Amino acid sequence: MTLEDASRRLTARGTTFSVKTEAECQALVERSPNISQLRPRGGPCVFGKIPLSKTWFGGHTDLILQLVFTPGNTLADAHFEEIGSLM
């Protein structure tokens, strides 16, 4: 999957996401290893949040994601994690 394909698919799912350059990805790993679960692979990376569900009392469940790409903008690895909130 290319970065363009991934961006289209994320947009179609209502994902809030940002694309970072390889240098920005590397800086995130060095500054905040807890934010970045995957090491850069020479290309850009994507961080995002997909809204999954909301409850009638205000809680919600989201999926956070990190995608890393090769220098040729091909998907190399992905990490997904479900997070929930009561408010």
Image: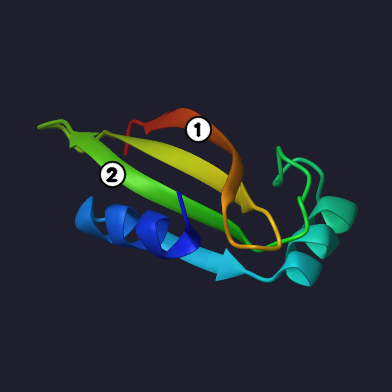
Question: In the rendered view, does 76 fall on the left or right side of 41?
Answer: left
Kindly report the distance in space between the C-alpha atoms of the residues bearing marks 2 and 1: 13 Å
Residue identified by numbered label 1? 80
Of all residues shown, which one is farthest toward the right?
Answer: 30
Q: Residue at x 15, y 32 (%)?
A: 57
Quadrant holding the C terminus? top left
Q: Position of residue 14 (x, y in %)?
A: 24, 56
Q: Can see residue 3?
A: yes
Q: Position of residue 71 (x, y in %)?
A: 71, 62
Q: Position of residue 52 (x, y in %)?
A: 25, 36
Judge whether 68 appears above or below 62 on screen: below
Q: Residue at x 40, y 37 (%)?
A: 63
Question: In the rendered view, does 50 fall on the left or right side of 82?
Answer: left
Sequence-wise first label, 2 or 1: 2
Specify the amino acid type for callout 2: Pro
Number of callouts:
2
Q: Can see residue 16?
A: no
Residue identified by numbered label 2? 51
Question: In the rendered view, does 34 fall on the left or right side of 12?
Answer: right
Q: Position of residue 51 (x, y in %)?
A: 28, 44
Q: Dot 2: what SS?
A: strand
Specify the amino acid type for callout 1: Phe
Image-quadrant location for residue 42:
bottom right
